[in-house]
Image (cartoon, helix red, strand yellow):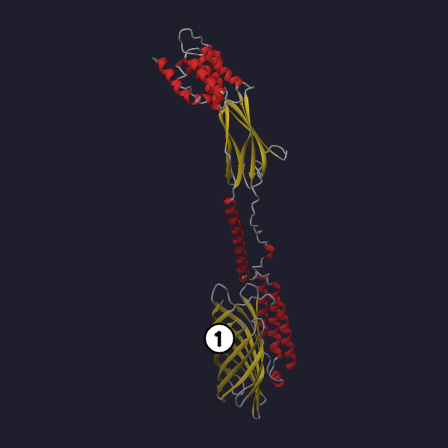
Amino acid sequence: MLQTLRRFIVVIAALPLVGTPAQAQRSPIVDVMLRARTALNDFRFAEADSLSTLVLTAFDRQLNRQQRIEALSIAAAARFPDAVEGAVQRRESALEALRQLVRLDPEIRLREDLSWSGLDVLLDEARASTFVPRAAHVAQSSLPSGQVQNVVTGTSTLPARWTWRLTPDSGAAPVLQDSSGPALTATVPLRFTLGEEASSIRDGSYRLLVTARNVSARTDSATWAYRVIVSAPVLERVPVPAALDPATLLPEVAPRARTRGVVAGLIAGAVTIAGTSAIRASSDLSSAVSVDSRSVMVGVLIALGAGTAGFLDKGQALPENAAANLQARTQRTNEIQAAIAENRRRNESYRATVTVEAIP
Amino acid sequence: MKLRLTHLFAGLATCLASVTAQAQEPKFEFRLGGVSQLSVRNALLASDASSSNGSTGGVDLGLRWKQFGFAVRAHGGTFDDSGPAGGSIGDLAFADAMLLMGPRVTALHLGYGLRGSSSVLGASSFSFARAGLTSAIEIGGTGISAVFSGGLLVPSFGETEATGFELETSLIWAPRRFPVFAQFGYRHEQFNLVSGDFERPEETGSVVLSGGLRLSR
């Protein structure tokens, strides 16, 4: 009953491959595949194996992915059939076919009409012992300054040592060379900054090589090559004014007034004393009455007072200069802050474009 | 004597200019205070010289805005006359008003003055016009200024013609943090009064003390 049902399913599944007789004649692959599947269905496992192997060897270059999976599946099923009368199980040979299937698709599941529990176990064994690394890349990304973009993500069925190297097309030394693992996954990060950081990529064209190496079998490895184009035009920044030169500021305190105090005191004292004697009303009066002698004492006191004030002076505050300096400092500070803010805005809105193309 | 005074003022102005190059002036200043003068007054009347001591008190008002200013001083007091009247008591009254033009360091002043006296000899008064220079030199940031003022006194209205000179020097202390001022100085003025055939030279020297409210900005 089970065999009858399986046969029915095989026939239904083969219909798209068979097509019309004319189409079958135009596609020998389909014809051989149909014969292999029929042989398998009729328990002619050796014939089915031969036909599927024929497809894989004779039409290797013409097979598309789906046809290759189909041929390998039939081969695996023919080499390790269910325990029916007269069936010969060639475990290692089937395992090899299953490994090739896993390399095509690590997540592959055999179709129900081809599979049975023993073959599923063998597929799991093939999956566990087959090194299948894969890499996927982000075709285009837009990076703000300082941000990291994982441009390539690698996955593997077995722990692998991942290495990558980013080399400028100009032939200069690699700008990025790193590794990770052993691990089942790895990412290749590219970092872009507007500054002069060594770890940052620059505007230009690069070649990226990513290699996954099976840690349990050193010779088992895979390499992917990519062309990486970084478009990072120069960011035009607003020039930030320099801090105010203290030499350009006005003095906020006048020089000490020692000289002024002494000179003013001497003048005031001398004028007080001499002026009183010089300005007399008339010769008759000046001869009759002496000049007021207190002028001498007052003159001396004025001279001493002014001179002492000059010596004690610490400099006159110049509030207008201080206000002008404050205004100049404030204005310069505002100019600097405005320039910094504008540059920050430009930095934040800046984006570098990273384009990644796989090289076959 | 006029020539000597002219030279004195010219030299004084030159010195002031040399030491006040960086003076910072307030734009506005208001001053109101009391003034007290301890004076000695000498006069010659009919070939007899007399000398009297006295004290006067009054008010001193000043207002200044930028390059212009106005000042009024009015005070009066009593003098003991030791002259021919032989120790009689006389009253004196002073009033002066001045317009100031120019910076504080060297300002031209024009004004008008009144003097009046009364004693046992009778009452008299005269007025005069005045013109001269006033200079205030700030000594750094101490708040102390040295003030010089000198001028010519010329006849004005009235029967008595008064001519003469005046000279005043003082120190003014006006702290920046407090709206007050104090002044100490000396004032000397000399007149030659002519009224008809009558001529009387006189001079007054006074120690000046004043103080009061001062607002500036």
Along the line of sight, the residue nearer the viewer: A71 or B122: A71
Residue B3, by quadrant, is bottom right
Looking at the rendered image, the quarter that the C terminus of chain A falls into is: top right
Q: Residues within 10 Å of mark 1 (few under 14, many from 20)?
A: many
Residue A303: horizontal and vertical position, in percent? 59, 69
Along the line of sight, the residue nearer the viewer: A64 or B90: A64
Along the line of sight, the residue nearer the viewer: A143 or A312: A143
Q: Which residue ends up furthest to the top in the rendered image?
A: A86
- Left or right of B158: which side holds B18? right
Residue A282: horizontal and vertical position, in percent? 61, 84
From the viewer's perspective, is residue A157 above or below residue B190?
A: above
Q: How many callouts does the rendering have?
A: 1
Residue shown at 53% from the left, 57% from the top: A326
Residue shown at 56% from the left, 38% from the top: A230
Residue B40: horizontal and vertical position, in percent? 54, 79
Residue A292, by quadrant, is bottom right
Amino acid type of the residue that numbered disc 1 sits on in the rendered structure: Asp
Q: Which residue ends up furthest to the bottom in the rendered image?
A: B197
Look at the image and tell me whether residue A128 can be seen: no
Residue A128: horizontal and vertical position, in percent? 46, 18
**Which chain letter goes with mark 1?**
B
Q: Which residue ends up furthest to the front in the rendered image?
A: A22
From the viewer's perspective, is residue A189 above or below residue B131?
A: above
- Left or right of A39: which side holds A168? right
Looking at the rendered image, the quarter that the N terminus of chain A falls into is: top left
Along the line of sight, the residue nearer the viewer: A24 or A313: A24
Residue identifier under label 1: B60
Asked which secondary structure carries label 1, the reply is strand
Look at the image and tell me whether residue A151 can be seen: yes
From the viewer's perspective, is residue A108 above or below residue A142?
A: above
